[in-house]
Image (cartoon, rainbow, N blue to C red):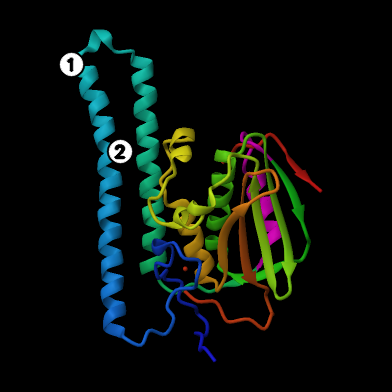
Amino acid sequence: MTAFPTPPYDFKASHPSSQGRDTPAIQNPGDRTYELKRELEVKQRFASDASHELRTAVAGLRTELEEARLHPDETDLGDLIGRALSDVARLDAIITDLLVLAGMEAGPPLRPQRVDLAEMVRDEIARRTDRIDVRLRLNAGVTVQAVPIRISRLLTNLLDNAQRHARRLVEVQVGTDDDHAVLTVTDDGEGVAESERERIFQRFTRLTAARRLDHTGTGLGLAIARDIAHAHIGSLHAEESETGGARFVLRLPLAGAAAPAVRGTERPLHRAMDS
């Protein structure tokens, strides 16, 4: 039987999503030296990727400003400011996500609480007032033992992703399956090819369609979401919805269920439809 920690739980993420596999991290490795080497390689690769993304965003902003300085008479000031603000927004998003990851990996242990998933979904939707419509299908009383700020971040990332890709509608469902809570976020967008459904959980991975729809994305949102799911002894995967769009399925042990203890880590919407 696998041993799990007792409260306070350690929510430091252990990089499962950097490899794109939906399996809880740390499987009692027999070779600790190998594990330490692997963790170091993952951190070095992540630092390299993060540096590249930040430099790319800064380079784009610098190029636009230098062109404007060299050719002031040919520059549309309003257009320049708009593009510059977009680049700044992307930089801000990258830095925010990097700080989230740093907090998960280096922060102090956090104490989980009972979280009502339906209530959390409603609270998050209430903060979104200008994006794609969201239909809610929520079973009451579905509670998990979790760190609220982490699960809120997971939900935010899934909703941001869905509303970015949806054509007209996003649907959120909360229910149960045996001793697990199940939360799904579905959009009616283009969907994700089966061959890409694991790769999208790798850090700094953005598919061509995602870049076309919104160049301000960081490529970290889904990776963070899966890290949080794994930290709660849960899982997060993508599948195709009935409409051909993407469906993200989160499974977490129900509060009080005979499941392993937790392990360590707006806007858009014209209305929310509850059914």
Which of 130 and 34 lies nearest the eye of the viewer? 34
Q: Which residue is mark 1?
A: 70
Left or right, 159 with respect to 231, comes to right
The picture places residue 266, in percent across and down from the top left corner, at: 56, 41
Whether residue 140 appears in this view of the structure is yes
Element on which disc 1 rests: helix
Q: Which residue is mark 2?
A: 57
Is residue 155 placed above or below 59 in the rendered structure?
below
Residue 130 figure quarter:
top right
The picture places residue 25, in percent across and down from the top left corner, at: 44, 74
The picture places residue 198, in percent across and down from the top left corner, at: 48, 58
Q: Which residue is situated farthest in the bottom direction here?
A: 1
Element on which disc 2 rests: helix
For mark 2, does the 10 Å Cα neighbourhood hold few (<14), some (14 to 19), or many (20 or more) residues?
A: some
User: Residue at (54%, 61%) from the top-left corner?
Assistant: 149
Left or right, 223 with respect to 182, comes to left
Residue 180 figure quarter:
bottom right
Q: Which residues are magenta?
A: 115-133
Which of 41 and 66 lies nearest the eye of the viewer? 41
Is residue 61 placed above or below 76 in the rendered structure?
below
Three-letter code, disc 1: Leu
Left or right, 223 with respect to 130, comes to left
Is residue 142 placed above or below 196 in the rendered structure?
below
Please tell me how many numbered marks the rendered image carries.
2
Could you tell me how far apart the alpha carbons at marks 2 and 1 are, in whole angstroms? Answer: 20 Å
- Residue 177 is tagged as none
Three-letter code, disc 2: Ala
User: Residue at (65%, 44%) from the top-left corner?
Assistant: 244
The picture places residue 91, in percent across and down from the top left corner, at: 35, 41
User: Residue at (48%, 38%) from the top-left corner?
Assistant: 209
Whether residue 116 appears in this view of the structure is no
Magenta stretch holds residue 2: no
